[in-house]
Image (cartoon, helix red, strand yellow):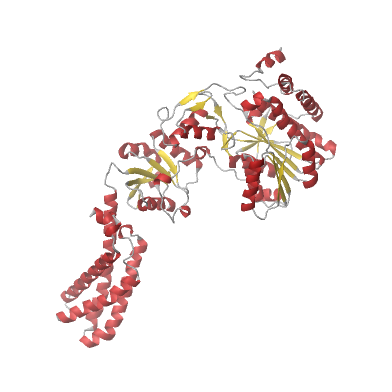
Amino acid sequence: MRKFLFYKTFHSRWLILVIDQAIVFLSMLSSVLLVQELGAAKRPVDDILLCLFAYHAVAAPLFIVMRMHTGMIRHSNLTDVFKVFRTVLLASLVYFVAGWLVLVPRLDLDWRWFYALSVLNLFVSATLLMVLRMAVKLLFCTLSDVRDEKKEAILIYGTDRDAVLIKHGLELGPQPGVHIVGFIDDKPARARMHIEQKNVYCRNEIPGLHARYHISKLIVSASCKDPEARKVVAETCLEAGITVTSVPAPADWLDGALRLADLPPMKIEDLLQREPITFDQRQLFLELTGKRVLVTGAAGSIGSEIVRQVLQCEPALLILCDQAETPLHNMQLEIESAFPDSNCIFFMANIQDEKRMNGLFAGSRPEIVFHAAALKHVPMMENNPQEAVMTNVWGTKNLADLSVSFNVEKFVMISTDKAVNPTNVMGASKRIAEMYIQSLQGGSSHFGSNTLFITTRFGNVLGSNGSVVPRFKSQIEAGGPVTITHPEIRRYFMTIPEAVQLVLEAAAMGRGGEIYIFDMGEPIRILDLALNMIKLSGRVPYQDVDIVYTGLRPGEKLYEELLNQQENTLPTHHHKILISDIVPLHFEQVSRDVKELLCINLKQNAMETVRKMKKIIPEYRSNNSVFNTLDAVLQS
């Protein structure tokens, strides 16, 4: 029986047709006997046999035409039930009309007897055919649920149509021995409900289900959009040792097989997603549509995403500026494919090159500037402070001054949380760039410019170039060890879409001089991030993949901050976005300090460069760095 139900070689469509016709024969025979027993006029056996064969002569061709025999009985559903009733009804109508015209007059049948036979047979045959299909399906589901140690126990997160389609895809897929234990839903009211003979459970029942069924995987439906709910259920599974996988939307796999082995593990980014930032799309379109927009660092992680989002707003001209040849070329190929009608300039240059940048501004006359170009790696900049100053300070000053000269409408600078109470050269260089931008907002009017200068400040961006996540992934794939500088080091994290949303929101609502800060919740311990990434990969921490501590790197601190002691926050229309209430800076003083720093930097003396940076930023205290000695000297 199990072979008959489970293997395609036994599923001959002609066998199904024969079984259906046998049921039709039994139905007609039982209907005749029932009509005879109810007291109607008795008919001779020859008449009864003629009525039986006449019905088969009508039903068999109609069953073939209506393709009653082509469905898989074990997967019958409500649509198949309607198909059965529709086919039987059509066969009964044809039989009744033909019989009324031929059988009744030729056999001298009582029309009431023939009418009763036709109606009774309609309901009996339809009922028996439906019962057959539902019985086979129920038997198949029952046998599917038989405990088998070779089966892989699966839970599906979600109870909507997509979740049911995942169940169908796995059951029809090529992988052997998949046991769908049930569905997980966030609403307790749905617990103990059933979907296609499978129980619906609450997420707090996952540990118990794992203990009972040895759940190996939880599959998250693509339709589950609530990031907090996804995070909670994923963390529950990881704690229990259950692998969490995601599945694309059904449209991406319905035409092919859904292979369990091909389902990717949930990304660590999914565990860190928050409520999406909703901002005024209309205002953003008004800001960007028909404008000439410049994006520096356009081939980088943040810059490239800004480019994609800006292109959707249909700017008159988009200038992509980057010094990296291959990434910029890749962006050109991507844009030519995805946005063939866009008007773009791919400008390869270093933002330190004043003449080159002046030519860009003079030739393209940008109206809005998104400044994403920067040197950002803390250890590298600690060893090369001169380059940090040249790119992050001089490059920013160069672009900002040109924006004033060419009367750019808005200049949006992308900063970092490392600029707050900096402990390293990279953070200090970004803070000095912030200070120059802020002071220029107050001083630009002296130059006859109405340029609005806006700063966005956020933490580490997952998936960006140089992010800890790609490094952890490669270490895990190599079998470990995963290297962490300190067990208690914590960082704020956000995804690339979140970061870009903040930048675009700043462009849309900024009125000049603000520092926009994204409320990223609590900082995440890097050790927890590593543990979750190892678990998401299906491995066991400290068994399959080890974790080792390498010590804090030069300039690195345990905790990052979003505000310094002199800053407070002001609310905005979105509860996740804050504005730093900054202390006003005088342009003349900041400009003088920056010029002195740049002059000192030309001497290529790292100690003297950092000494001046510390004088500009009194709160700059080096950590685990060769520049620690300067702090004691400056404080004395």
Does 252 sit left or right of 609 as displayed?
left
| Position of 622 relative to 121 (above/below) | above
| Image quarter of residue 607 | top right
Percent position of residue 341, x then y: 67, 55
**Residue 440, position as x, y percentages in the image:** 78, 34
Residue 420: in sight, yes or no? no
The percent coordinates of residue 107 (x first, y second) are 20, 86
Q: How many marks?
A: 0
Outermost residue on the front side: it is 326
- Quadrant of the image for the C terminus? top right
Looking at the picture, how far across and down is residue 34, in whole percent?
A: 18, 73
Tell me which corner region of the image, top left, top right, bottom left or bottom right, holds residue 234: top left
Of residues 572 and 400, the one nearer the viewer is 400
Relative to 392, residue 155 above or below: below
**Residue 393 placement, left or right of 84:** right
Which residue is at the far top?
636
Quarter of the picture containing the N terminus is bottom left
> Taking the image as drawn, is residue 591 in sight?
yes
Q: Quadrant of residue 392?
A: top right
- Does 573 sit above or below residue 614? below
